[in-house]
Structures are given as structure tokens and as C-alpha cells.
Image (spheres, rainbow, N blue to C red):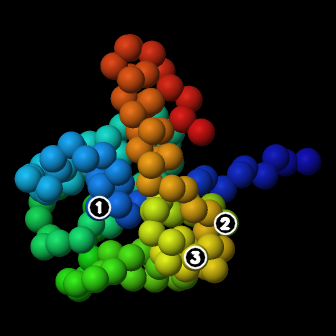
Amino acid sequence: MEDAAEPALRWLVDGMNVIGTRPDGWWRDRRGAMRALAAELDGLAAASGERVVVVFDGAPHDIPAERVDVRFARRRGRDAADDDIAAIAAADADPGTLRVVTSDAALAERARAAGAQVVGAGTFRRRLDDLREDRGAGGRSSVP
């Protein structure tokens, strides 16, 4: 009997929601905050092997990322990234393996309705912080 491999878990991240969890002055350099988050998400993808997509609000610009699919909302305005994230979740062929990262209640409800799991932005931010600390100490992290 062959072992069926478990489907890989995937992350769909509301980028500005995660950035906004920390009042560190990110609003003075939104693009810098986006680049920093993308770099942290690259670290998560490298450590876990999981696929990561991040969706940002705002005008598209270059954000270097090796392992992360960086996207910008297709339109501007209120809930633009949320609408894109909800559409991605709704169209996903295997939403049970998708974890949507947001603290927006309406988006969380839409993601759950599509069959995705939801992780709060603050909880996810702490996961990234723990991973960075583990990597900074030279240790290897087993990111769940």
C-alpha cells in the first residue's frame, strides 16, 4: 500500500494587514515595509517549504522575493486586496490546504466560506518573529 502524501499547506497573506500589526512607523516607508515583509515571507517559505502568496494594496512596484509570489490588488480603493484574496480563495481547487492570513473579520468570513483556514495577522506576525529569532541564533526552525 502506498502512502498518500499530504497536500502541502499554502499561505495567502494580506500584506498590509500583517504590516499593520506593529506600530513601528511603517507608514513613513510603506514600500520599505513591503520589502521587509516579503523578505520575512521568503524566510518562511525557505524554512517550511510551503508556498506563500502575499497581496498588497497600493501601486505595483518591484519587490524582490525568491520564493514568494508578490501581488498587488488589481484595483485601488477600500478592500481592494481583500477582494483579490477572497477571489483567490474562492477559485482555489483545494481550499482546505490554504491558510489566509488576515485580521479583517469580513475577509476572514469570506475565506472560511470558501473552505480556507484563517490565521490572524498578529499570530502570523509572531510566527515570523519566532522564525527570524531561530534563524538569527543559527538554529533551524520547524515552522508548523
Q: Is residue 92 visible?
A: no
Q: Is residue 71 left or right of residue 99?
A: left
Rendering coords of residue 18 (x, y %): 36, 54
Q: Are marks 2 and 1 in contact (CB under 8 Å)?
A: no
Q: Is residue 34 left or right of residue 31?
A: right
Q: Which numbered circle lies on residue 16?
A: 1
Of label 3 and label 2, which has the lower sequence position? 2
Q: Is residue 5 left or right of residue 108?
A: right
At a point 27% along the width and 77% down the height, the residue shown is 73
Q: Residues within 10 Å of mark 3 (few under 14, many from 20)?
A: some
Residue found at the very far right of the displayed protein: 1
Quarter of the image containing the C terminus?
A: top right
Tag 3, which secondary structure?
Answer: helix
Q: CA distance from mark 3 to mark 2?
A: 15 Å
At a point 56% along the width and 29% down the height, the residue shown is 142
Question: As displayed, is residue 69 above or below residue 40?
Answer: below
Identify which amino acid the numbered label 1 is placed on. Answer: Met
Q: Are marks 3 and 2 in contact (CB under 8 Å)?
A: no
Q: CA distance from mark 1 to mark 3?
A: 18 Å
Identify which amino acid the numbered label 2 is placed on. Answer: Gly
Rendering coords of residue 133 (x, y %): 39, 23
Q: Which residue does the numbered mark 2 point to in the structure image?
A: 96
Q: Nearer the viewer, mark 3 or mark 2?
A: 3
Q: Which residue does the numbered mark 3 point to in the structure image?
A: 109
Rendering coords of residue 112 (x, y %): 62, 73
Tag 2, which secondary structure?
Answer: helix
